[in-house]
Amino acid sequence: MEKIKVGDKVPSFKLKDQNGNLFTVNNTTGKPMVIYFYPKDDTSGCTKQACKFRDEFEQFKNIDAVIIGISSDSVESHKKFEEKYSLPFTLLADINNEVRKLFGVSKSMIFLPGRVTYVVDKDGIVQYIFNSQFGAEKHIENSLKTLKDLKIS
């Protein structure tokens, strides 16, 4: 499994979102993106992470960034997660872990799906990767800082 690195182009992929619509990452180029892989809907760390993205959503929106959360949960699970916590961003159902494998996101601690965040510029190039199972909220802080730094340069 080849891992995506800083400087790589985001691979093309399509997955269903929490509303059952087909999401194509290529339709998002032209805007910066935060693509984050997380283990499971409605678990403690994943809920903290999603709610922190929700709470900081206006800051991401102000810099025209798109937030995309990906896990192996179903469309239905994502819909419940979105509604329960009023999440204003896209959640994608990677049921067969195909996109996780495409990015090279491995398991952590042997059994848990990895928690990895990719910050992608408007040209679709990965500018920053943060890989940490713990400190889920740090993913949001680091993503915002990176996006703001990109905006300046």
Image (tube, helix red, strand yellow):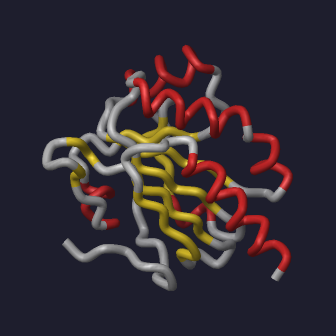
In the displayed structure, would residue 9 be above or below residue 146?
A: below
Q: Is residue 35 left or right of residue 57?
A: left
**Which quarter of the picture shows residue 123?**
bottom right
In the displayed structure, would residue 55 be above or below residue 27?
A: above
Residue 68, position in %: x, y? 54, 48
Quarter of the picture holding the C terminus: bottom right
In the displayed structure, would residue 84 be above or below residue 131?
A: above
Outermost residue on the front side: it is 135
Quarter of the picture holding the N terminus: bottom left
Residue 128, position in %: x, y? 55, 71
- The one nearer the camera, 8 or 55, is 55
Q: Is residue 119 left or right of residue 37?
A: right
Outermost residue on the left side: it is 110
| Residue lying at 33% horizontally and 30% vertically, measured from the top left | 74
| Residue lying at 52% horizontally and 56% vertically, measured from the top left | 35
Residue 71, position in %: x, y? 36, 41
- The one nearer the camera, 100 or 39, is 39
| Residue lying at 76% horizontally and 72% vertically, measured from the top left | 149
| Residue lying at 19% horizontally and 48% vertically, measured from the top left | 109
- The one nearer the camera, 22 or 54, is 54
How many circles with numbers are drawn on the protein? 0
Residue 4, position in %: x, y? 37, 74
Q: Is residue 19 left or right of residue 123?
A: left
